[in-house]
Image: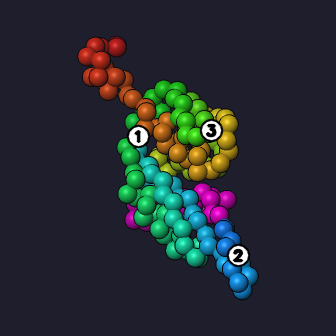
Amino acid sequence: MTEESTRGELIEKVVKIRRCAAVVKGGRRFSFSALVVIGDGKGRVGWGYGKANEVPPAVEKAGKDGTRSMVPVSLRGSTIPHQVEGRFGAARVVLVPAAPGTGVIAGDAVRAVCEACGIRDILTKSYGSHNAVNLVKAAIAALVSLRSQGEVERLRGVSLS
C-alpha cells in the first residue's frame, strides 16, 4: 500500500489513507486522512497526518506536517548501532541491527520509516496493536532513542573501548 515520491531530496512515503463518512441529509459525505512518512535517506525522519475532502490535498498536508516533525537518527553505516524498542499506545516495535546485505525485514508501516530514514539493513518485529499510525510513532520513538558509542561515552564521561 506504500506509495513513494521524492520532493527535492526528501523521500515521501504514503503509509495509509483512510476514508471517513459523515451522514448528512443528502446521503454520505466522505473525507480522507493520510499518514505520510518523510525522510532524507541520511538519518532524518518524520511523520505527518493530514485530513481533507480529497486524497491529494490530504497527502500534501501530511507531507508538510512530516517535514516540520523531522528528527535526527543515529545510524552506523546502513544499520542501527544497537537493538532498541519503541512503544506508542498498545503498539510495540523492536528494531535489531542486521549484517550488510540483509535488507529491511519489516511490515509496511515500519518499513516506510526505516527506508525514509536511510536504513538498508535491519530486522524488526511488532507486537500488540497493528494500527499503522501507532506503529509509525513507535518506530520513530525507537529510532530517536538510539545512541552511538561516542554519545554514550560523552554522556557518561567514561571510555567504553
The 10 Å Cα crowd at callout 1, few under 14, some 14 to 19, many 20 or more, is many
Q: Locate residue 15, reporting x and y percent.
A: 60, 57
Decide which of 49, 40 is in the foreground and name it: 49
For the residues carrying marks 2 and 1, which lies nearer the camera in this image?
2
Which residue is identified by label 1?
A: 73
Disc 3 and disc 2: Cα gap in Å? 30 Å
Instruction: Give the quarter of the image for residue 1.
Output: bottom right
Disc number for residue 23:
2
Residues in magenta?
A: 1-18
Q: Is residue 124 left or right of residue 66?
A: right
Q: Locate residue 109, reporting x and y percent.
A: 61, 49
Decide which of 11, 156 is in the foreground and name it: 156
Residue 56 higher or lower than 132, as above or below: below
For the residues carrying marks 3 and 2, which lies nearer the camera in this image?
2
Which residue is identified by label 3?
A: 90
Secondary element type, mark 3: loop
Q: Locate residue 58, reporting x and y percent.
A: 53, 70
The residue furthest right is 27
Secondary element type, mark 1: loop
Name the amino acid, label 2. Answer: Val
In terms of sequence position, does the residue under pointer 2 or pointer 1 come before the other?
A: 2
Question: Residue at position x 48%, y 26% from top?
Answer: 82
Residue 60 colored in magenta in the image: no
Question: Residue at position x 39%, y 29% from top?
Answer: 147
Count of numbered tags: 3
Say whether residue 26 is visible: yes
